[in-house]
Image (tube, rainbow, N blue to C red):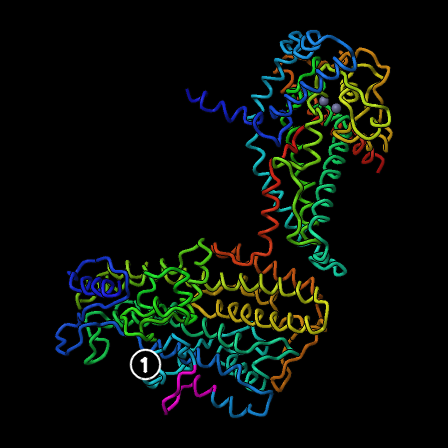
Amino acid sequence: MEFLEQLPALFSDFANPKKRIFFGYLALSVLIALGWLTLVRKTSIAEALRRIFDRRVFFSGSAIADYKIFVINRIFTFFISPMLLSQVAIATGIYFFLHSLDFLNPAAFTGVNQATVVVLFTLTLFLFDDFSKYLVHRWMHRFPVLWALHRVHHSATELTPVTVYRVHPLEGVLYTLRGVVVQGVTIPTFYYLFGSAVSLYTVVGVNVLVFIFHVSGSNLRHTHISISYWPWLEHLLISPAQHQLHHSVAERHFDKNFGAALAIWDWMFHSLHLSSGEGELVFGLDASEGSSASSLKTLYLQPFHDIFRILRRRVRGFYGLAQRLMTRV
Amino acid sequence: MKSLKLTTCLVATMMFAGTAYAVETYGPFPVTVLGYDGEKENSVSYSGQIARHVLHDSLKKLAGKGNGGANAAELEAQMLSYFNGSETDLPIIAPASKDGVPVKQTMLNEISAGKNIAGKFYDGSMPAWPGEMTGKEVILHMISHAAKADGGYDAVNGYDYAQLISKFTMGAMPYSQAVDNYLDEKLGEGVKPNGQAYKTGAYYTGKEHVWDEAFGYFGAASHSMRLSAEDNYNVAKLRDLGSADLNGDGVIDLKTEYVFGPAYYAAGADKSGKTAYMETMMGAFIEGRALITGANGQNLTDQERAKLQSHAKTIADNWELVLAEATFKYAGSVYKDISAITAASSEEEQAKAFRKYVKHWGELKGFAMAMQSGKNDLGKTAVHLNRLIGFGPVTLDGTFVSGLDADGNFVKERKMSWNSYQLHMLRVQELLAKNFAIEARANDATAELAGLLESLSGDGGAETD
Ligand SMILES: [Zn+2]
Ligand SMILES: [Zn+2]
């Protein structure tokens, strides 16, 4: 009985337009997929629907693990509130710090009209947020300790919109911290310069640019519907097909397309891979990773085990180095 | 409505039966002195404290009367007559009748004769002001400079003497006297015992009068408990005769119907809707008085005294918070004023913004000094507060008062940027919020920032690809 009472809270993200899996965005994704398959790929509506709601995908071991992880990870959300407190601390600290820059008065730009401030703030926050996602994602692949965590997301062999929640809780913490830092820096800086004119241009309470990202099918990146954009557009925005390619097991696709909404970061830092001419992709990890698509025990615990091993190796390395240095002295 | 209020008082008085009873006004309370055979029926008396509030309000008004030096000697003498008291009766300069809001008394002796501020002024060390002086020396220093200034305004050093004198006094006299004397040692056993008249022939007992005097220093109207924060505020501003005139005689009786400084600032914080200082303090005053009256002219038992002391603690604690709220508020005003000064587009606009800034700074400084005139040694907090606020505000050429020369004149040997001084104001607010349980926090310079952060939280920042 008590469990049933908790159900609405458990699934509140489906009703929250700030979240990607908001039912409205999901419905729009279905429509976009349907349009793509029938109009561009010229399949029949029946065939299109069969592919969109593919039972082999949604009832696969990998997808079922996604669903379980979605529920289990809710338990870890209580880690989030203390981090929001640290956001206030960061923001206040930066706001205080800015006062020490004698060449820049607080509210120095209060004369700027409000519309300009709102546009500037909305754009800056979106760009900074998107870039930080690119950067952290890149680190996730680059550093072994972080990869041990991020591997959980890549262990999915079938992609569903819920795969966005297929994240090790520790990676979730790191991503939240990323958001804390971005907002904790951007907001006080704008507030310092523009005073109370600062506000976000929102639609249904969401940054309008994030809203556009979601209504244009952000959920499709974690599906089997391979929607590509024109090559020029894939230099600017990450298409669903480009992110699917990020999940590919093929070695030529490794460390490509780290971007969230924008492709410009991948383009700038040479990790962009266009989607054309790639054919059917296989998702998941190389067998050598020793991960699992469906075992929760492996998904939750293996990262700790791996991190421990990596750190132990490091410590031994340092110890050995220190010993060699000592004997030399 | 008014007659109804009166009836309530009378009923409350008649219901007196030796136990605590619910009353909403401070008095009337029956005479309990054993063996008293005079005609008095109400033992409440605090007119001496009201006279001192009136001396303070008048002194504040005088502090703004200088003409830049010509009348300095004369004005200083006049101010000192209000500070030290006078053999002859003094006219009440403030609070004085306003259009449609007449004040009953016009001369001080109509309230109480022979009173002064000097005898009740905090005279411990006051490091917040340059010159290493005691509290009383500081106020005399301020008075002498106020007399020489033009309209109480010293643009060079950034002082508004009316504000400085008034706000400092609000702590150094009523607050200090109440929390460090009447609500402290005078509540002790054997001091002004309740089993005896306060003095021979008095119609109030020792403890009754001690408590009344503390209430008098708080400066609320006897019926402030019944008024909203807004009403109390408007009564103090002489804007609302209806709310003030409890007995319906068409005039405001300063002795019972007016709201003076300390109570006015309690109401000011309560206007935020986040605090209830007036209700809490009035409640404690009334319950404390009812408890003493309930002892029926006998000495208080240990239990009764403990209860009384807990009411006293409630009053002292909240009083300190009221002063901290005011300090917090004016630090926020000063912060905003600096933005206006730096953003000013003409010299005239800047001078106007600077005048406002100096006024608010005077209030900030005065209240910060008031906080340091009570019973509590604020220790490190006071040191930091004084360092952040400084001896004087940063002035238009970037300098600020750093001390006094041998003749007692201000010297400005240090400089600071506007930004740094704004940061100091943020730190003042941070310091106060951290060390005092203040809730109203008017003019919070970082509240908007916190609100902005709040409004953007939970936006899916944790979504991973
Ligand atoms: Zn990845
Ligand atoms: Zn992904």
Subunit that carries the residue with mark 1: B
Residue drawn at x 57%, y 38% is: A82
Magenta stretch prevailing secondary structure = loop
Q: Position of residue A297 (x, y in %)?
A: 61, 16
Q: Position of residue B63 (x, y in %)?
A: 51, 82
Instruction: Tell me which corner region of the image, top left, top right, bottom left or bottom right, holds residue B2.
Output: bottom left
Image region (quadrant) for ligand 1: top right
Residue A42's place in the image compared with A175, above or below, is: above
Q: As rendered, which of B273 and A32 lies closer to the eye?
A: A32
Instruction: Tell me which corner region of the image, top left, top right, bottom left or bottom right, holds residue A287.
Output: top right
Q: Return the residue at label 1.
A: B111
Residue extent of the magenta highlight: B79-93
Residue drawn at x 68%, y 22% is: A219
Residue B176's place in the image compared with A194, above or below, is: below
Task: Indicate left or right for B60 with B284 as reference.
Answer: right
Does B87 appear in magenta? yes
Residue type at mark 1 is Ile
Instruction: Tell me which corner region of the image, top left, top right, bottom left or bottom right, holds residue A39.
Output: top right
- Please state, as top left, top right, bottom left or bottom right, where the C terminus of chain B lies in the image: top right
Q: Position of residue A248 (x, y in %)?
A: 78, 16
**Classed neighbour count for the residue bearing mark 1: other residues with Cα under 10 Å, few (<14), some (14–19), many (≥20):** many
